[in-house]
Image (cartoon, helix red, strand yellow):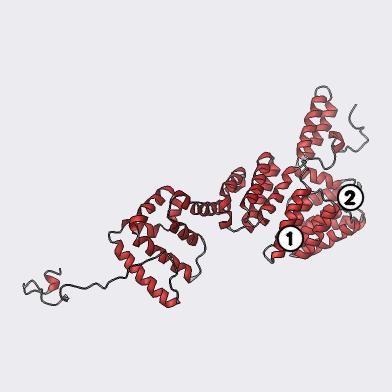
Amino acid sequence: MTLFNNEQKKNYYEVLGLAKNAEAAEIKRAYFGLVRKYQPDRFPEEFKEIRAAYETLSSQEKRAEYDAIGDLPASVAPLFHEAQRFDRFGRHGKAAELYRGILKSHPELDNVREEYAWSLRNDDKTGKAVEVWEELCRRQPGNSHYARELTGTYLDRGWIKKALAEARRAVSLDRTSIDNWSSLIACAVMNINKTQEAWDEAQALSLEALKAVKNIKTGEWKKIHLYAYAFITSGLKKKDIARGHLRELVRLTREGGRESREEGRQALEEILRFVPVEGLAFFYSELKELADLLPDMHNKQFRLKLSDIRLYFDAENLVKKNFHEIFRDLFRILLSDIVEDEEALEVMAIECYLLDNRDIFFPQMRRLKAEFPDLYALYDSFFNEALRSRNPEKMLFQRSKKLAKLNRKYGFHDIHDKEDIPEQQPIRRDEPKVGRNDPCPCGSGKKYKRCCGA
């Protein structure tokens, strides 16, 4: 006896004994449990149904298509399948035309209207997509999923205020949805650089969201974004609290499956987008651990960002490694974009200070080259010249002269309180100057250029 009569339409969720919102792990667990009960050699028909259900629901694309079909009329199903095929191949405009045609004859099919909205959004027709999502929200005002999708489409249009209002409505409809909270805080984070009030609001919402979903264990990996937003909105002032959020993010990414790694990648993208690189230096260890969990982080762009964070991290730790703080100050300037004349002069003043105290700093430059080669490489042109020069006094004199000239030009005085550059005395010759065509002083009678000056 099969699980379903042949005349019945097979519901794959019922075949596996699952709810429609079942997680991937639940689907896998239910499948293997039923396979042990309905072995293929003894129950071939039942096994075929179980296998078909599992193959459909375990595939994200197939499951989405299966969920969207629902109870479509037989006359509509072929057109719907064709529209889905167009969507899969990126022909979203053609898919939208088919969905629109279906809705003309069957305007009651909200699942088709939802697919229509997605096709419009993917085809960059966000204005029309907004209209369709708004229609869905009017038809089903208690559906928080539709409210959340409308929020995302508002963001596509750059309508932050509308998106915030709709995201709040989605949360009010379902406060236990991690996705709803993530959508709301994403809207708030888009506003954080505008006013202090917006920053405080985003921070408060992040903490409220973590509290609201604290006891939810199903799909816990979805909390990754919430911890990312909590880290971003912490302002990094309370480093222990910020580090705690980041460690939870790393833990959830590590303990989850493919979905958690994808969420972790998106979370790291958001962090790198909103937090300055220098602010992330204190959390390099946690960020490195997170990046190592994500295969996509081998992407050159992300690796370069992570490398920059490591350089800031190393620079901040130089003093702990018994380097003079002047090196930390130098690298702070070098790692930022030097656009101000005063910062460029600051670097030159530091060069003078290092050269004037070479007995102290030259051994530290050699240590820097051995222990922190990447930092050394940031300014190796100066370090190499200083270490190899046979006349560092000349280097100091040249830079001191140039520094004084630029100070006068830009009106800067005493721009670095550490330098104590000695006054340079003019060079005086003990003997009179001899021109190249003058008689040679040795008395040979030849021109100087052909005798001692040759």
Marks 1/2: CA–CA distance: 47 Å
Image quarter in which the N terminus is found = top right
**Figure disc tally:** 2
**What residue do we see at 88% from left, 37% from top?**
10
**Mark 2 highlights which residue?**
76
For badge 2, the amino acid type reads Val
Q: Is residue 15 left or right of residue 93?
A: right
Residue 152 picture quarter = bottom right
Position in image of residue 66 (x %, y %): 83, 44
Element carrying mark 2: loop
**What residue do we see at 92% from left, 36% from top?**
8
Position in image of residue 52 (x %, y %): 81, 35
Viewer-nearest residue: 91 or 357 = 357
**Mark 1 highlights which residue?**
201
Q: Nearer the viewer, mark 1 or mark 2?
A: 1
Q: Residue furthest top?
A: 42
Element carrying mark 1: helix
Q: Is residue 211 above or below residue 15?
A: below
Q: Does the residue at mark 1 contact the one at mark 2 (Cβ under 8 Å)?
A: no
Position in image of residue 375 (x %, y %): 45, 54
Q: Is residue 153 left or right of residue 5?
A: left
Q: Disc 1 or 2, which lies upstream in sequence?
A: 2
